[in-house]
Image (cartoon, rainbow, N blue to C red):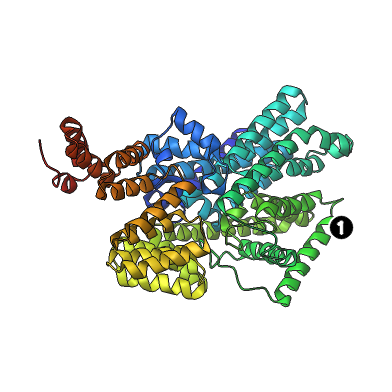
Amino acid sequence: MPGARALALAAALVLVTLVVYWPVVGSDFVNLDDDRYVTANPHVQRGLSLAGLRWALSSGEASLWLPLTWLSHMADCQLYGLAPAGHHVTNLLLHAANAALLLAVLVRVTGSLWSSAAVAALFALHPLRVESVAWVAERKDVLSAFFWLLTLFAYAHYVERPGASRLGLVALCFAAGLMAKPMLVTLPFVLLLLDYWPLGRLARARLPALIGEKLPLAAMAAAVSVVTLLVAERGGATVGWRPLPLAARIANALVAYAMYLTKTVWPSGLAAFYPPPAGWSGGEVGASAAVLGLLSALAIVSARRQPFLLVGWLWFLGTLVPVIGIVQAGDQVLADRFTYVPHIGLFIALVWGGNHLLRGFEAVRPAAVAGMTVTLLTLAALSRRQVAYWHDSITLFTHAIEATTGNWLAHNNLGYALAEQGRTEEAARHFRTALESNPGYPEALNNLGTLLARQGLTEEAAGYFSQALRLRPRYTDARSNLGAALAAQGKTDEAMAEFQQLLALDPSNAQAHAAVGSLLYRQHRWEEALRHLTEALRLRPDLADARFHLAAIYWQQGRYAEAAEQRAALARLRPDLASRLPTP
């Protein structure tokens, strides 16, 4: 990106982005996937290692294949441990880098500094970015977008002088992006759009040749798409075609596109989760289809003189396809984070379209510049306010409940956060509210059961765990909790059966091994108990109960040196438990 002015703009954009989002550094982790990605993931917490690399490459955790994202979280744990500030700083720095890189890419392919700067600023400061930046678990958004933009930059380099080595660099950047988040599968399509405008390659080459050079990238995208669908199905993250008819999925997609456009223009009522409605009215679907059809027709009709409208619009539509709901991933109808890359296309159409309208009206350009400045300042202020909602789980989900209706996930997660603070009655109320909105919500059933179990109401708790398992038989947390509730009632055989079933589903479940070891310990089946307890501690050295029972068995067997070693290790974890063991 040549020129002192361009460098100054990039530096200013990075600085403003850091200032607007800086309060996120003081935020905590939230109980929405941050546990799965960082705070309760032992593979990630151990930091970078060969074992961690093998796990990252083979894991389908979170029902996605994201090896590069896992490695970035491991690197953060290596550097910062579980201090949330460091993890937030990484997200923020990546977002600021993406803003500067977007500016560089657009200047390189269009040669227009100020229009490129306007697009990059709109992208960086829009409140719909907050979710991707402030949410540690959404590292995959900012990281994959970084490689998306690097791929575009490498492609611009390739177009200047095509060659195998330059195309190989494009493929390498693209592969890294796919390993950060599979949503990048649409990138070959965007490269074809850029061939049309601003690169103008369609005027110099035949379309089949341009498609042919991208076939290796398309093959990579297809392979990752297959892997993603298989992993998601295995993890239960996708809703199959039969439960929701195709017509309903298309209706969802049409309304979701319209809602994204609305939130772009009027970014209010933003929430970490938008609960799906029972269905859309014919008027909502029809109005959404009409708006999309009108804008599409406008882009097509204007394509010859204003190709940027068609390119930007198709960029927006096309890059949302993987998450628009045709193949439903998760419970959400839409999500702020899904606009991270698609918004770039929309802003290209808006900025270049606005510039085109101003041609011949130079007298109004100062007013247009002032309007853009006011817009950016407003977006920055809204983003700053939105960042505050991500301070912790209680602020996040309290706001989500205020911003939406019937938000069962927000009630459940707020209840979980309140339960962690010992606010039992408030927590129970939110769990029950979640179940009123969504009676078939396994997480709320499990959480309410957990709350009851802590109060000693294990029989009632077991009923909730059983309900959760009827809805989701592979729900390992609920099965573990059911086993514990049965054990607390003295139903040892039934508890053992639940834990054995859990180990059949998840052989590396350390807590299940510890629970089986504990039950075997009660039955004086020392050798069998030892096998499970040692395996539990191999997987999770911090499991105090497993270490307690292991030390107790060693003591019973007269293996006093080993018992003393386990007692000393336990004293560092739970001095209260260690004090209950005999001393040599």
Q: Secondary structure at mark 1?
A: helix
Residue found farthest to the left: 584
Residue 443 seen in the current view: yes
**Which amino acid, mark 1?**
Val
* Residue 576 in the figure: left or right of residue 111: left
Q: Position of residue 322 (x, y in %)?
A: 67, 52
Question: In this figure, which residue is indicated by the disc labeled 1?
Answer: 301
- The front one of 128 and 118 is 128
Q: Residue at x 34, y 38 (%)?
A: 531
- The front one of 235 and 324 is 235
* Residue 490 in the figure: left or right of residue 335: left
Q: Residue at x 62, y 73 (%)?
A: 278
- Quarter-of-image position of residue 65: top right
Q: Residue at x 44, y 51 (%)?
A: 502
- The front one of 318 and 486 is 486
Q: Quadrant of the C terminus?
A: top left
